Amino acid sequence: MAKAKQKKTGAPARKSAKTAAQSGSMMVVGGGVAGVQAALDLTDLGYYVYLVEKSAAVGGAMAQLDKTFPTNDCSL
Amino acid sequence: MSKEEFNPKILGFLCNWCCYAAADAAGVSRYQYPPNLRTIRIMCTGRLDPAFVMRGLVEGAAGIFTGG
Amino acid sequence: MLSLSGKPGNFKAELQLRPRYIDADKCTACGLCTTYCPRHLADSFNEGLDLTRPIHIDYPQAVPASYFIDPEACLYLQHDTCQICVPTCRSNAIDFSQQPKKISLDIGAVIMAPGFGRVPEEALTQYGYGQHPDIVTSIEFERLLNPSGPFEGEVRCLSDKRHPKKIAFIQCVGSRDLGCGNGYCSSVCCMYAIKEAMVAKEHDPECEITIYYMDIRTQGKDFDAARIKAEEHYGIKFIRAKVADVIPWKKNLKLTYSTMDGVHRFDAYDMVVLAEGLDSPTDARALADITGVELDKYDFCKTGFFEPLASSRDGVYAIGAFQGPKDIPESVTQSSAAAGISAGQIKAGRGKDIVIKEYPTEKALKASDEPRIGVFVCHCGINIAGVVDVQKVDDYTKDMEGVVYHAQSLYSCSQDAQKVIKEMIKLHDLNRVVIAACSPRTHEPLFQETLKDAGLNRSLFEMVNIRDHCSWVHANEPDKATDKSMDLVRMGIAKARHIQPLPEQTVPVTDKAIVIGGGIAGMTAALNLADQGFQTTIIEKSARLGGHLLDQRYTLSGENMADYLKKVTDQIAKHKKIDVLTNSELAEVGGFVGNFSSVVRSGKGSKASEQTIDHGVIVVATGGREHVPATVLGKKVPQSDKFITQKELEIGLAGKGKNRAPKSVVMIQCAGSRGDDLAYCSKTCCTQAVKNSLKIKEINPDSQIIVLYRDMRTYGFTEDAYREAREKGVIFIPYSMDKKPSLSAKGTKAEVAFYDPILQDDVTINPDLVALSVGTVPESTAELSRLLKVPVNGDDFYLEAHVKLRPVEMPVAGVFLCGLAHSPKPVDEIIVQAQAAAAKASIPLVKGQVSVEPIVSSIDKDKCIGCRLCASLCPYQAIEMVKVDKKPKAETVVASCKACGICAAHCPTFAISMGGFTNEQITSQIEAFGEALEEA
């Protein structure tokens, strides 16, 4: 998680003038468990990620859960 | 002598992934517990060589705690 | 998000950044501001069951670990008064001058994961929600169970704080309910209700818990086992019934319900939990308007069966509950899959925008160099200094051996403190750094980064935790907390004297992949890997690609399977980066993540040939097939052509046979599954039965179809098809295990006898056809699990590394898993899982190297006697035996080692050392503990 955040705060690199060139950045909308995992995987795959979350912290609904089914592992 | 507080010094070996993390969480939640434990972080209780336990007792620990 | 324009590869997104009014870089999450904030606020994180303040943090583990101010509730932001918090913050982090900002981003692809919304209010109020405080939603109950919840983990009635002795769960609240507009099944409520019931039972074994349900849908991997455990081990009662209403009755709640036999009953409960479903996200429509994606009739994102994550707008993907209600492992799987697909689509952008940091050259350190230790004791504002006498701790280090510099720091994690640490390292020529502050689990990487910036090896660092383990937990005993801090610091310094620099190790990677199995899972994974630019070899046992898809004809929504299969096999054939080896099997596997070398055997007998392939990763997609049960419903299947499987029925229905949709058909669900012949639920049979029923009705609307089932598990949107089948006259009748239907063949006639719980009588009929839903088994996993050293579960499916968070990885690094070899599942879920496995597998290939934490084990070959004890104990297959001068010696496979130290603890000759946790270091800590005792 720290990694994705770190990348977010850095300045994006300059794009080439050619419009045909593909961007090297991705945007993930939503910082729940799905969004966070996607952002982490994209970072690992060599992309700069903007993780956009409307509330003050990532984690979403999973952070509210006590334990998870069926192993009763802790959610956090 | 009878009024003297029982105040043992316990040496703890804490697994980085569970017990050490749990001790951190206890702090974050401000749970209070007696200040008798001195801890050594290890990456897994699998690392705990029985020799460390013996050495701890020789050095004067009243007890050894392991959490993993 | 305000707008999205452009196309894949070149989107432009406009965003509005809302201020949090707190500088996240300065905030230390000490919590002082919250204690001073004068206003109370319902805590939405605890579902309003508890109180917080406008300036707060949702939960201690939140990321970013920074407080924020709720502008709707803050007295200053609403009424221009107060500002009490500003001077209380010791690190001056509160900043009311922050303003909303608009920013614009250039991006290649968009992944949407807005989560789920709450079900309509009327779904809750029909069961009395809002009329009595002890009627709670399942999420409220989840918070009640949680130690950080309103009663610190004690389950209490909200009305009078008593412990409830009888709790009822009502299932399908806001799901499978056209009344509130949600016709679909939410797919998660059965699981979490069972989980909550089990946890509640653990809190209070005396508590009686009843779950009222229509169908218990625990179709996921190993989920049924948990359901059985809930019933048999925990004594949780399950009643198939429709609940009419819940009304307050004296101190309790009266719950009225009707069972299958038509009888109304009622029972009293202390607490009623409404298992509320997942709705589409509240802002789904706004999001759809902004991004231009289409929604389905329930306002979830519209996606296709064969491209389950692609929205109607190219380059925009939907994952998680927005794509359809689903649980955590499936959401996590979709996340990886979407990352992989977008990476395949935007291949040219890879690596362009990433920022690579550079460090100064590391200073060489010889073993003979005297330790020059610098100690920094942190105040953490008042978090440590408020309890521990920091000055005393600092003074204590003064005369210790090796300490050449010691100081205090107000916030040692702050940016300016890093500058000071770097300067002091240079000024005093420090070669070890000890920081007494908070937890290494959260802050070690930050300080190690500082060491690297200062030209020191990052291993020359030790952290002492005098906050989480000391000041915070001994707040009322400052003297003893100070003593403990001093002891811990002494032990940390003792260890630091023995710390040696450890080399950063990396292992190069062969950027090729092999995929075992050429079914839909294997082909999908191979295509994604190849699209990302990696040479991939598919190894298929049979003569052709396709796997179990070759036996499927059509999907529930009517798409033709053969057309799709042809499209995929054509893509494979054309792709330059994919090799296909048919009639081939893996014969040998050697190596480890990044550097596997495998022998593949092709052909049989005299024509057999072998070749060696070097590759970096392995995707296991060996698939499964329809089960052939030895017994059905406890008996042998009657020998008659009237008894066929659902697969055979589907093939017949898709053909041209005259009598393919006969006048009367009986379908038997769980024929050989769920404890009959197989122990588990095969997840897909209920949908297949509904699919085939609808097909029969399409061909012959007069056909009478009876489906005998235990629980109809048409989860998610397939619930709509189940409803459609009932509307079209298909009869669904449940059976229980103590009144099983019996199957027999009398001459040319088939006979089915069963108990009808509505008629309350035994019924015998002679249908034209009996279709058995026989379930799915994995293709043999025994041989491959031995070759790859990966485990299987009790049902012979491969076991993933972590059920929730690493669903497509295996415990052995570099080996990934997807498809029916993982568990039974429908084709759309297989496709997503295969895409996810491919994405995960491509991570080491993209990086080009596997980096190794320096804490792995190392083995002194001179001391090693080759006893193999370590190799046999290692849980990660990270120790290999090699020959040195013809003698066996152990060697660490650094890429696989997880640094647990089991080997080091067991080595009879002390030949094994753990980086950062050597015998010498740990012993010195123990000795320092002893010295501290003597001092006291």
Image: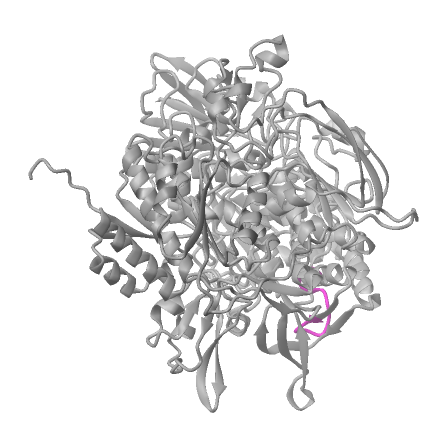
Residue B14: x %, y % from top left = 36, 52
Number of numbered discs visible in the structure rendering: 0
For residue C237, say whether it is visible.
no
| Residue in the foreground of this view, choosing between C333 and A1 | A1
Please name the residue shown 34% across and 77% down the image.
Answer: C909
Residue C135: x %, y % from top left = 44, 20
* Residue C117 painted magenta: no
User: Horizontal placement of C554 versus C900: left or right?
Assistant: right
Please name the residue shown 52% across and 63% down the image.
Answer: C854
Q: Specify start and end residues of the magenta stretch as a single range.
A: C538-549
| Residue in the foreground of this view, choosing between C441 and C828 | C441
User: Horizontal placement of C528 versus C468: left or right?
Assistant: right
Split into 4 quadrants, where in the image is the N terminus of chain C?
top right
Residue C348: x %, y % from top left = 83, 55
| Residue in the foreground of this view, choosing between C857 and C391 | C391
User: Horizontal placement of C752 versus B25: left or right?
Assistant: right
| Residue in the foreground of this view, choosing between C152 and C581 | C152
Residue C445: x %, y % from top left = 54, 50
